[in-house]
Image (cartoon, rainbow, N blue to C red):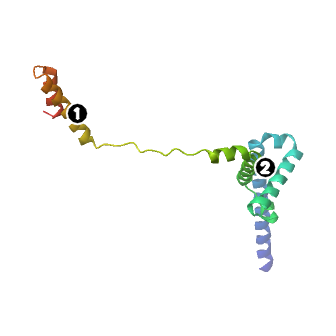
Amino acid sequence: MGGYLNQQQQASQEQFAVQQQANLERQGQALVAAVPEWGKDVEVGRKAISNIKQGGVEHYGFTAPELETLTDARALLVLRDALAYRKLQASNPTVTKKLKLVPKAPLRAKATRHPDEERADDVSAARSKFRKNPNDDDAGAEVLRQMGL
């Protein structure tokens, strides 16, 4: 009975190893698809990944073993982008400084009016126009239209 369990456990471990290897191959293909130059020159890709892992340790608190067990290409690409952004910010501090010195203009809220207030103004304007010229049929019609009659 013990031999049978050992065989099952060994078969399960082998199957897991095959699945893990297939996943690593898929993730490697995803990296090459995302960064084609890594696929053209393997040494360039290895050096870039090494630099990314080193940056993850230095700047983001990962441990080297954590990054060695990283199997998701997306996570590596996110870390690459974060390090590139950090490098961009560090290389151009004068622009950042200038942006901080520019005073921000206060934003004014646009006055919003209730639709009933706008309608009342329209009615008032139509009445005023009618008072100026009571013989103007268009002004009288406008007053009635604005009042909803």
At a point 10% along the width and 23% down the height, the residue shown is: 134
- Label 2 sits on what residue type? Gly
Secondary element at image label 2: helix
Towards the viewer: 148 or 97? 97
Q: Residue furthest bottom?
A: 2
Q: Quadrant of the N terminus?
A: bottom right
Residue 5 against residue 114 in the figure, above or below: below
Question: In the rendering, at what x and y percent does residue 5 appear?
Answer: 76, 75
At a point 44% along the width and 44% down the height, the residue shown is: 108
Separation (CA) of disc 1 from disc 2: 68 Å
Report the side of 81 relative to 145 (left or right): right
Picture quarter containing residue 2?
Answer: bottom right
- Label 1 sits on what residue type? Asp
Q: Residue furthest left?
A: 135
Q: Of the residues under marks 1 and 2, which one precedes in the sequence?
A: 2
Label for residue 39?
Answer: none
Secondary element at image label 1: helix
Mark 2 packing: few (<14 Cα in 10 Å), some, or many (20+)?
A: some
Residue 40 against residue 76 in the figure, above or below: above
Report the side of 85 relative to 110 (left or right): right
Picture quarter containing residue 148?
Answer: top left
Label for residue 122?
Answer: 1
Question: In the rendering, at what x and y percent does residue 124 appear?
Answer: 19, 34
Towards the viewer: 74 or 107? 107
Question: In the rendering, at what x and y percent does residue 147 appear?
Answer: 15, 34
Towards the viewer: 19 or 44? 44
Question: In the rendering, at what x and y percent does residue 15 appear?
Answer: 77, 62
Front tag of 1 and 2: 1
At a point 20% along the width and 31% down the height, the residue shown is: 125
> Could you tell me how many numbered marks the image carries?
2
Label for residue 28?
Answer: 2
